[in-house]
Amino acid sequence: MQPLVFTPFLRPMLWGGRRLAQMLGKPLPPEGTWGESWELSAHPLHVSRVAEGPLTGTYLTDLFPHFPLLIKYLDANDWLSVQVHPDDDKAMSLSGEPLGKTEAWVVLDVEPGGRIFAGIKPGIDRRAFEQALHDERVTDCLHVYQPRVGDCLFYPAGTVHAVGGGVLLAEVQQSSDATLRLYDWERVGPDGRPRQLHVAEALAAIDWSRGPVDPVDGTPLPNLPGERLVQCRYFVMDRFRLKDPLNSPYSDQLSLWMVLHGIAELTCRGYHHTFTRGSTVVLPAEVAHAVWHPAPSATLLGITLPKP
Ligand SMILES: [Zn+2]
């Protein structure tokens, strides 16, 4: 097997913009606001297919029958709803999805007005939160800050969050579409009506023990030009800032790579391909001796599944 590239699934969104094309090279139609590029998905809403090479057209799920992650780029040009995702135990009852959603973001670009709301401020209990929701000032209850390029946010299921004002993100999450909206900024959809909220379900999904969420402090990886950003029961996420070639540190296991900044060439036996910012590449476990060559520098995200 060789490295695999899949066709992105581009989604128009009320809150989207044009940066998926401008900054990440996604083939957007000339008009409209686009919020998400689903890079790798086995979710029934859209299953990714191989874009090039001998396996062109093959579904991700035919190659990896239990692919548990959903990987996206996200342009939060305007505001995403204030939302929470249920955990695995509550996902079916609260949102009709078989799996919950734990997710992580890495910030790729920020406009001056870009903000992230992450977690509930200290001292806000459920009663105070419900009162604020009723008074349409729920954002007063949330920890907010201006993100910087490179920030990584980790949201275990049950963490209230929102983002907007011009923030471009890479997102890694469980393969689930279980999103519960608490507040949608008094906004109406293309049909002139507000999008549906799920306040009761969202309140039941919130992990009230979880306070403010600040960016992750990565842990250096021994003998590698990288750091571990997230290690949870669903995925492991490492970041590499390359000036010199990197032998893929994930031998004999499936790894997923996102080019966050710069340009890098990937080589392995009989294969070489240059990837620019916004690319996503799958390295099947069978691929040996894969090497990333930055040209001349690149920041890569390496995503793997936790070993059982
Ligand atoms: Zn979310």
Image (cartoon, grey):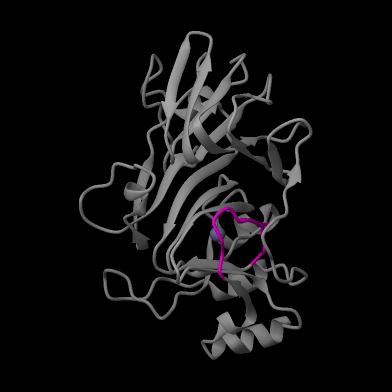
224 horizontally vs 168: left or right: right
Reply yes or no: does residue 151 show up in magenta.
yes
225 horizontally vs 256: left or right: right
Q: Which range is magenta?
A: 146-159
Quarter of the image with the C terminus is: top right
**What's the residue at 61%, 49% (across, down)?**
99
170 horizontally vs 274: left or right: right
Residue 253, given in percent of the width and then of the height, sits at 67, 24
**What's the residue at 45%, 74% (across, down)?**
184
Splitting the image into 4 quarters, where does residue 79 fall? bottom left
Q: From where the camera sits, is residue 101 visible?
A: no
Splitting the image into 4 quarters, where does residue 124 fall? bottom right
Reply yes or no: does residue 70 show up in magenta.
no
Residue 145, given in percent of the width and then of the height, sits at 59, 72
Residue 165 vertical position relative to residue 259 in the rendered view, above or below: below
Q: Nearer the viewer, residue 67 or 268?
A: 268
Splitting the image into 4 quarters, where does residue 202 fall? bottom right
Q: Which residue lies most toward the left here?
A: 30
Q: From where the camera sits, is residue 171 visible?
A: yes
Residue 4, given in percent of the width and then of the height, sits at 47, 24
Ligand 1 located in image quadrant: bottom right
**What's the residue at 37%, 75% (across, down)?**
194
Q: Nearer the viewer, residue 164 or 97?
A: 164
Q: Nearer the viewer, residue 194 or 117?
A: 117
293 horizontally vs 249: left or right: left
How many dots with numbers?
Answer: 0
Residue 89, given in percent of the width and then of the height, sits at 70, 55
- What secondary structure is the magenta-colored segment mainly? loop
